[in-house]
């Protein structure tokens, strides 16, 4: 797949197609469809068990079958932007999901939720959320089984509030699914230093991503350099990983 700055991005999810309008000329990063949101949805589509009578055949081992079982689970998306990930996961079976972002991004999010209402058969829940606002976090009524986030690590100052929000929203046995690409070396370093103190981290191998929605990293090299044209998995795992909440933390 080639990522594009087209004003409308189409995202096929099983038999449905989401049409996501973006505005790359906006001053707000949340009005663009960032690549990791698509990568995350297509990774989940590849491995998530199909609901009901449409159960996926078990001819090959599925290492993510239990992880991506969305039945009767609750989910919240942080930094939803145009809503690609949240809408995609709804179509994959995470039907109790709420999409959140800051106030300036809400018009773009609401527009896309409205435009895709016929595909989703409903307007998904959405809410304003600033990661450092404890009252807004409380109003979301955590905990959640799944916390979704894609392309949210790009400003060093927001790393602390982001991790605090994740920790406040995820349940003790819940999972944070994070679509990640290095944007800022400083934010990247701080994020992993802080995350390792409160979460158990497992990176998804590049080969487990959807083959049509996977791409090589194109950021500056980090310590250790590249391996075979991509960054080593031990560094930034381009671009998808899952974070499991550590039950040892209180």
Image (cartoon, rainbow, N blue to C red):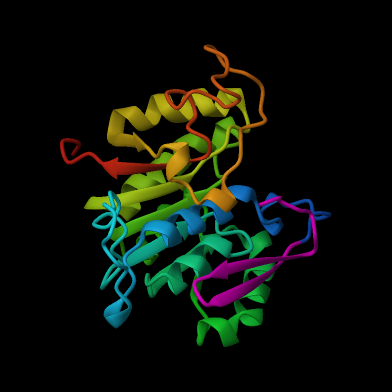
**Above or below, 181 relative to 220:** below
Q: Is residue 7 left or right of residue 80?
A: right
Name the spot of residue 120 as percent of width and height, x first: 52, 81
Q: Nearer the viewer, residue 245 or 240?
A: 240
Quarter of the image where the C terminus is located: top left
Name the spot of residue 182 as percent of width and height, x first: 58, 32
The quadrant where residue 66 appears: bottom left
Name the spot of residue 244 as percent of width and height, x first: 28, 43
Residue at image position (57%, 56%) is: 38
5 inside magenta stretch: yes
Q: Nearer the viewer, residue 68 or 98?
A: 68
**Above or below, 122 relative to 76:** below
Residue at image position (43%, 58%) is: 46
Seen as rendered, the residue at the extreme top is 224
Q: Nearer the viewer, residue 241 or 245?
A: 241
The quadrant where residue 218 appears: top right
Q: Is residue 80 left or right of residue 165?
A: right
Seen as rendered, the residue at the extreme left is 248
Residue at image position (29%, 67%) is: 57
Residue at image position (49%, 59%) is: 41
124 inside magenta stretch: no
Residue 178 appears in the rendering: yes
Seen as rendered, the residue at the extreme right is 25
Q: Nearer the viewer, residue 86 or 101?
A: 86
Seen as rendered, the residue at the extreme front is 59
In this picture, which residue range is highlighted in magenta? 1-22
Q: Is residue 70 left or right of residue 104?
A: left
Name the spot of residue 30 as percent of width and height, x first: 66, 55
């Amino acid at each position: 797949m080639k990522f594009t700055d087209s004003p409308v991005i189409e995202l096929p999810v099983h038999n449905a197609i989401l049409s996501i309008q973006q505005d790359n000329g906006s001053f707000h990063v949340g009005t663009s469809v960032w690549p990791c949101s698509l990568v995350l949805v297509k990774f989940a589509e590849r491995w998530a068990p199909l609901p009901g009578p449409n159960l996926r055949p078990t001819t090959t081992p599925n290492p993510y079958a239990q992880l991506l079982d969305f039945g009767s689970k609750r989910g919240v998306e942080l930094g939803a932007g145009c809503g690609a990930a949240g809408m995609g996961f709804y179509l994959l079976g995470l039907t109790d999901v709420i999409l959140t972002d800051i106030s300036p991004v809400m018009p773009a999010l609401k527009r896309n939720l409205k435009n895709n209402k016929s595909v989703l058969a409903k307007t998904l829940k959405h809410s304003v959320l600033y990661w450092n606002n404890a009252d807004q976090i409380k109003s979301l009524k955590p905990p959640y089984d799944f916390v979704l986030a894609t392309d949210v690590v790009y400003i060093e100052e927001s790393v602390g509030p982001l991790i605090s929000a994740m920790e406040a929203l995820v349940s003790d046995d819940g999972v944070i699914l994070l679509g990640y690409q290095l944007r800022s070396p400083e934010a990247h370093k701080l994020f992993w230093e802080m995350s390792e103190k409160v979460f158990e981290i497992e990176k998804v191998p590049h080969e487990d991503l959807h083959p049509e929605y996977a791409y090589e990293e194109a950021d500056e090299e980090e310590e250790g350099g590249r391996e075979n044209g991509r960054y080593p998995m031990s560094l930034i795992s381009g671009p998808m990983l899952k974070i499991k909440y550590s039950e040892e933390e209180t």
